[in-house]
Image: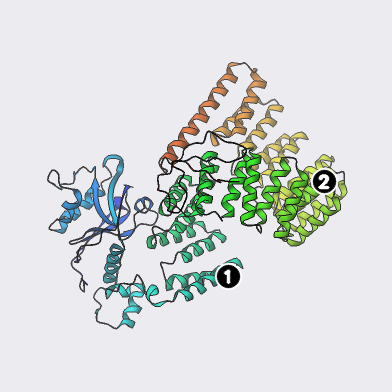
Amino acid sequence: SRTTSMPEERVRAQDMMGGNVMSSKLTGSNSSAGREFEVTIKKPAGLTVTLVEGRGIFVEDLTPNGNAMRAGLAVGDRIKVASELRYEAGVKFDRGSSYSNAVNNVANPRELEKLVELMSDSSAPLGSVKISVVRSLEGQRIMERFRAQKRMGNVDTRLSQKVKGTLLGNLAPFIDGSEGDSVASSKVLKINLDLVSYAARRALQRKEFDKSEDLYRKCLKMDPYDGRAWVGLAKLYEHKNQLFKAKDTLQSGLQKLPRSPFLLQALGCIEQKQGQLVEALKLFQRAVEEDETHAASWVSLGKLEERMKRSWRARQCYAKAASVEPNNFYAWQCLAVLEAKEGNVRAARSLFEKCVDVNPANAASWQAWGTMEKKAGNLNKAAELLWKGLKASPKNTFVLQALASIEWERGNMEEAKELFERAIAINPGDGGIYQAYAMLLARTGKKMQAREMFKRGCTEAKKHAALWQAWALHELERSNVKEARSIFQQGVWEAGADKKIFVLWQSWGLMEAAEGNLDEARKYFARAVDVADRPAPSLAAWAKVEEEAGNLIESRELLEKALAIEPSNEYAWDALQAFVKRVYGEGSEQAKEVFQRRIVAQISKRIDSEDALSKAIDNKYQQDSKQTEDTVVLRAKWASRRRQGVDDYGSNFLVPRQL
């Protein structure tokens, strides 16, 4: 029944809850069953709850990125059961009566306040609470009506629709008990929403950011439940390198669409970019649980598993993506590239064939396949594949550069030069093209031409640190120390904002050390360590210089500092082991002690990684112990049931069935 007046509210701020806790009274009939699931919420919870008489306790609001939102709660969820609580706040319950029944049958709001006190008590065991909630569309509508009533306050509900629309915006329909979810869904034609969404996407592709943002916000005003607008707006902020703003946008969208795999996957990608791998894994896992057929989420999950050095799990995720969406060429491509990395060339070749069969216009697939064939020594086959990729995408500079390098190795230098020039004409600011071109010229003895190409590249791509480094090293090989020093200096001025600027400082330090200028070398090594995201290699190079100068104590200190910063850096461990073997002998106690430390560090890293990831994922993977070169056998026990219409392989499945 519709409520036209607001009863007394009791509001009390709870520091441990991370927001306001509100108890109020609404009346209505029993709600529908909805979907029931369990969640465990860490404290502080970060949510607002509302008691609705005759229905139970509902989630009214969530703190963005709070523990309740991370656990998967959404506005409108009804708290049904809470288990394993110790009722130390003074609330008494009869033995055998459930927490839900006790709460829903309380006679006065004071009992709810005691409940709030209990849930916000951080001294509860493990600092978390396990609850069972019911999610239904009716619950969401109840909270929308409640919000609308709060916004109306003392405004007369008999005002015209136009006035109420101005006051309430998209909450106006809920005051009148409308069955629509928003103004947009009842008044906006889908074709109009599609057109605005398409225009926003095209503006984003043209990098018209202001126009795209205005259009996406217009989409949200038309229908706040349209996931495309939330994802598009987040991508816009990503293009502008505003990751936190993109993250906030997706979290706002998830309040409207808590089960959207598109929003969950997009938010997971941002978390991954920010280094929050466990959070990203949780989001990808939620995405595939909400929609098992969402191939993009499976691919993202596979990419993350591959980054965590779990190739067997990555393989299964890619295979799942290919099985639920056989026409997804990117899933086949990821699977093929993984097999190539693992050395399964014949299997990778078969998967690449499937990939380009699905989408022959994708140049990246042809390039990846060609790169694999080149590494296998099949230059003619690699060239054939890359020419097909170039035909599919004539302006793809990555394909042009790769093909130019192969043609150069095949002896077709004029053809290679023409391809390099085509790539430069398309993207004159890509320093990698000039670098590859110049290094090939230098390798074939054309030193002056190589110098001119380096100079040309550094004029066009001034911000490319690796290009400056390659030029300086080229001059150093020709014993032009003064010229190399000048190039290093000019490079750090021009490319100071490049994240790879540390390679210039490090190379400069090595050069000065070789020239006997140890103080200058130390100064440049220190700059390399300061600006590097991962400074262990720079510290190891510095340590080698100190060792050669006879400063063994300083060398050991630098290596230990590298391992203190990056305890699992294999390069730093290699350097330390080599150091103690040179100084103390291969069979010395010091060498044995360093070896044991390295083993312990490797085990600790593995255990820490397993512990962190095991909290985020279910045991849905089973490592495949049998691989053949003819087929890729992917064994996995999936908790979810097979979709109807898909072949059932029992507890295992084979992807692809026929290559």
**Which residue was labeled with disc 1?**
203
Q: Earlier in the sequence, mark 2 or mark 1?
A: 1
The residue singled out by tag 2 in the image is 410
Residue 463 visible, this orientation = yes
Measured from the top left, where is residue 381 in percent x and y? 75, 47
Q: Is residue 624 left or right of residue 13?
A: right
Residue 67 in percent (x, y) is at 36, 50
Q: Nearer the viewer, residue 269 or 481?
A: 269
Disc 2 versus disc 1: nearer the observer: 2
Q: What coloring was used for the rendering? A: rainbow
In three-dimensional space, the C-alpha distance between marks 2 and 1, rounded to whole angstroms, equals 43 Å
Q: Secondary structure at mark 2?
A: loop
**Residue 59 position by quadrant:** bottom left
Identify the amino acid type marked 2: Arg
Pick the front one: 278 or 407: 407
The reply, left or right, for residue 65 in relation to residue 147 is right
What x and y, as percent, mark residue 142? 27, 66
| Label 1: which secondary element | helix
| The image quarter in which residue 514 lies | top right
Along the viewing direction, whichever of 628 and 313 lies nearer the viewer = 628
Q: Which amino acid does the dot numbered 1 rest on?
A: Ala
Picture layout, residue 305 above or below residue 295: above
- Near-viewer residue (272 or 315): 315
Where in the figure is residue 286, as x and y percent of width and height?
42, 51
Q: Residues within 10 Å of mark 1 (few under 14, many from 20)?
A: some
